[in-house]
Amino acid sequence: MRVPDLIFHKLFTSRNAKTREEIRRAHEKIATGKRITRPSQDPPSAHKAVGIKRERWELTKLAENRSFALSVLTLADTTLGSIHDRLKSLYASAIRASGDLLTQEELKAVGEEFKRALETLLSLSNQRFGDNYLFSGASPETKPFDENLNYAGLSEEFYVLIDKNYRSAVFLNGNEVFGNITHDFHVYDITLTQGFDNVPDNDDVSFVLNSETVSGDSLEELLLGARQKLGDTALVLTYEKPTGETVIRIVSQSPISVLGAKKTSAEEVFLDNVLKVVHHVFVVLSNGEPVGEDEIELLKLSADRVSYARAKVGASMRELEHMRTYQEIRRDILDNAFSELVDADIAFAVSDYERYRLAYEAVMRLYDETRKLTILAYI
């Protein structure tokens, strides 16, 4: 029994269209390397692929955060290393400048070393990463230490998200890194708010020590008067602020009453950070005084403080390195899962393409032979 031409034509047309579509899809897989190019081709797999792609994007952003945090902390580690080395050197110089071994001029020369070191330490403490300060905490655009060596940053640290449940401190609290230093002795600063006049013997500048007034017409008279009032119970020093104001510093083992009077203001000073400690030792030496045990102990505490902060930074850096390994493994897993859903198997695609092409050619030959049949073939 023969198949009528009309039915044969319809079957051929249907099969031809299907085969051509299969060839087109196989060719598309080979050309693009993708099994799915439109969601409609495999909706469940396409939905999964979108979720994996979103997770890969999130992981990329977290990896960028990790790389940024590691770069910042690497600079912080280098900076703290330089500060620690400088403090150890100053500690050795302070020991050399203690006791009665050096003359006043030699002590002042060591003081110049501390002055230069303080400039370096202040610069390092205000180190930047790009436009942000390393040690200003959660306010990285704020300069952490001013010219008076006071901390101006925030007590909270600046964190970045490294993973869904893990964040890392990046810009550190400078008060925590360089501060929290305590001492048992008392320091008072008396600032001369105005200069001396040219009128002799009118005692135009004064302040009050333990309810007794100290007055004078020159800095030398004020220093002498303070030393006479306090005797051996306190050390009376002088230095100049960056603003140019003259300051009389009194160092005492016991608390004393210090009040400002004519053209003066007074305050108790706390050497609560590394920079203030170095500055205080500079003041002692620049007055030709030997470094005492208290100052040596403070320098040691300062070096230990910075060493501790550097150890914490190193621990954070190691944790970030572990996170890098973890994130790289996660990335590989996500890439493989995405590839299994979306990417085509080129070898199978080529095989399918050849199979469909041969089938198409066979159908076309059959159709061609059918069209050549004459009326004699039906007899």
Image (tube, rainbow, N blue to C red):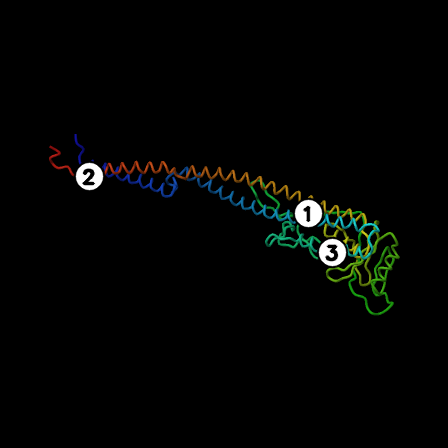
CA gap, disc 3 and disc 1:
21 Å
Callouts 1 and 2 close, C-beta under 8 Å? no
The residue that mark 2 highlights is 368
CA gap, disc 1 and disc 2:
88 Å
Q: Earlier in the sequence, mark 2 or mark 3?
A: 3
The residue that mark 1 highlights is 177
In the displayed orientation, state which residue is furthest to the bottom.
199
Nearest the viewer among 131 and 262 is: 131
Give coordinates of residue 44: x percent, y percent: 41, 37
SS of the residue at dot 1?
helix
Give coordinates of residue 65: x percent, y percent: 56, 46
CA gap, disc 2 and disc 3:
102 Å
Q: Earlier in the sequence, mark 1 or mark 2?
A: 1
Left or right position of 204 against 66? right
Q: How many marks?
A: 3
SS of the residue at dot 2?
helix
SS of the residue at dot 3?
helix
Q: Residues within 10 Å of mark 1 (few under 14, many from 20)?
A: many
Q: Residue at x 67, y 49 (%)?
A: 82
Camera-nearest label, 2 or 3? 3
The residue that mark 3 highlights is 115
Nearest the viewer among 52 and 114 is: 114
Nearest the viewer among 324 and 190 is: 324
**165 versus 262 height, above or below:** above
Give coordinates of residue 303: x percent, y percent: 72, 46
